[in-house]
Amino acid sequence: DSQLISTSYKGRMLTWVGNADAELVTNGTSDSDYLPSSIVGLTTKDYNTKGQFDSCGSWLSRAFQDGDLIRGLYHAETACNYDIGQTYKSMAYTESSDGGQTWTRPNYPNNQVLTFSGSVMFGQAAGLGDGSMIIFRDKGIDYYYLYYQKIT
């Protein structure tokens, strides 16, 4: 469901893919370091998500190193009935202090960074999601640009 997400971290390349949950697929310096494993803390089973904004799934959209942390944004869905094309999308913040092996959701469920004021409509997708972030550095200042799809 999500594209390949990667970042460098302490001389290694970390790569994730996702479909409802995120999975770390590489954790090393070459493609021979393939390590398929679910990411603890970024899967819906790791939190009591019933009735929350990410009850149908959460998968990594962007990750970047910030000192010893890896910070990330994840795509979240709730109110889903995929058989009829219904879901409500948003995005939220997550972070890892162990090189992307496990993730926390600080201030959960108040870690959303994008929400939509509209309501879930029967049989339709709605919300703000499917985002990507670009980090641009100019004269020592980091600028973060978040691009996303608005579905109404």
Image (cartoon, helix red, strand yellow):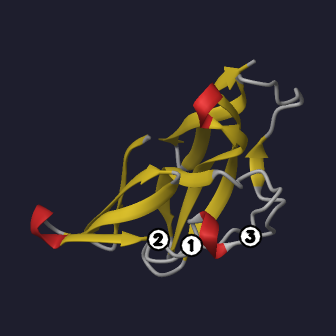
Furthest residue toward bottom: 98
Q: How far apart are marks 2 and 3 (CA)?
A: 16 Å
Q: Picture coordinates of residue 7 (x, y %)?
A: 37, 57
Q: Picture coordinates of residue 2 (x, y %)?
A: 44, 42
Crowding at mark 2 (Cα within 10 Å: few <14, some 14-19, many 20+): many
Q: Which of marks 2 and 1 is in front?
A: 2
Q: Which residue shows up at 88% across the image and 29% down it?
A: 119
Pick whichever, 61 or 8, lies toward us: 61
Q: Mark 1 points at which residue?
A: 103
Q: Picture coordinates of residue 138 (x, y %)?
A: 52, 40
* Image quarter hosting the C terminus: top right
Q: In this view, does 102 lie to the left or right of 53?
A: left
Question: Residue flagged by tag 1: what amino acid is it?
Answer: Trp
Mark 2 and mark 3 residues within 8 Å of each other at the beta carbon? no
Q: Which residue shows up at 59% across the image and 32% down it?
A: 83
Q: Which residue shows up at 75% across the image and 47% down it?
A: 113
Question: Residue flagged by tag 3: what amino acid is it?
Answer: Pro
In the displayed structure, 63 sits above or below 120; it is: below
Crowding at mark 1 (Cα within 10 Å: few <14, some 14-19, many 20+): many
In the displayed structure, 33 sits above or below 71; it is: below
Pick whichever, 147 or 20, lies toward us: 20
Mark 2 and mark 1 residues within 8 Å of each other at the beta carbon? yes
Q: Name the residue under label 2.
A: 39
Pick whichever, 97 or 41, lies toward us: 41
Q: Mark 3 points at which residue?
A: 106
